[in-house]
Amino acid sequence: MRFLVTGYQQLVCARKVTDDMEHYSFPDTTIPPAYGPYSHAVVAGDFVFLAGQIARDPVSAHLIEGDITAQTARCLEIVSDILKSIGLSLADVVRTTVFLSDIGDFDAMNRVYAASFQAPYPVRSTPQVKMPFGALVGIEVTAYRGRHTKAFESPQSSEDHGSNHQLTDKPQHDH
C-alpha cells in the first residue's frame, strides 16, 4: 500500500493506492472534507465511484442555507469539482443517485439537474430518504473513464512517494 500526494490543476489531493484501486480525498481544497471514514472517490478499473455529496460550504463544511434548487446546484458543483480533479467531467457520469428528503421537491431538483447534464443522460434513481444534517438533497455518481486516453503517469519510479502525477494524452494500449 502506498500513499501519494498529487497535484493537478492547482488542487491537492491525497491518493491512497492499493492493488487495482485508487482512493482520493481532497484536503485543503474547495471540496468539503469527508465527515467520516470514507474517500471522496475511488477509481476501480475504468469506473470512478464518488461518495454521496450534500450541499456543504467549502470553508465551514456546514450545510449551506437555501432551498432545494440551491442545494442541488451546490451538490452538483461539488461532484463536478471532484470529477474535474481526476480529469473527468459530468459528461463522463453514467449513473447517479439523487437522494431527496422530500419527494415533493423532485420537479425543482430535476430542473437544476437537467441544466447540469446533457443528452445522453446518465441512468438515475431518486429515492426519498432521511438526509443527514437536515440536507434536502444528496447526490452520488459513478463515472466511466474508459473512453479517455488520459492516464496518470509518473516520470519517476512508482515507489517515489513524492512524485508529482500529471495527466497525459498518451494512448493506453492493452498488449
Image (cartoon, rainbow, N blue to C red):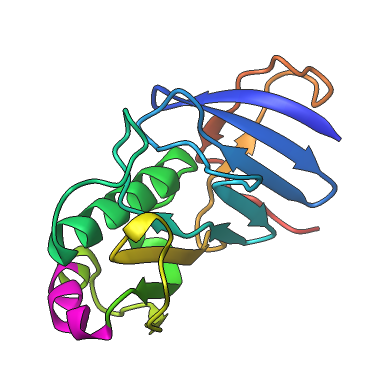
Q: Quadrant of residue 140?
A: bottom left
Quadrant of res 57: top left
Decide whether the magenta segment is chiefly helix, strand or loop: helix
Q: Identify whether 102 is placed above or below 56.
A: below
**Residue 159 within the segment the image draws in magenta:** no
Part of the protein shown in magenta = 103-112
Nearer to us in this view, 66 or 90 = 66
Q: Residue 62 vs residue 105: left or right?
A: right
Which residue: 61% across, 46% down?
39
| Direction from residue 14 to residue 63 in the image, left or right | left
Asked whether 108 or 175 is in front, the reply is: 108
**Vertical side of 114 occupied by 41: above or below:** above
Q: In x, y percent, where is residue 66?
A: 14, 54
- Residue 151 x %, y %: 59, 43
Q: Quadrant of the C terminus?
A: bottom right
Q: Is residue 34 above or below residue 6?
A: below
Quadrant housing the N terminus: top right
Residue found at x 64% / y 50%: 172
On screen, residue 119 versus residue 37, left or right, reads left
Membership of 108 in magenta stretch: yes
Residue 86: percent from the left, percent from the top? 49, 42
* Residue at point 60%, 41% (across, down): 24
Q: Position of residue 164 (x, y in %)?
A: 61, 19
Residue beneath the point at 37% across and 82% down: 128
Residue nearest the observer in this picture, 119 or 71: 71
Q: In the rendered picture of this protein, how many numbered marks are placed on residues? A: 0
Quarter of the image for residue 119 reads bottom left
Q: Nearer the viewer, residue 10 or 136?
A: 136
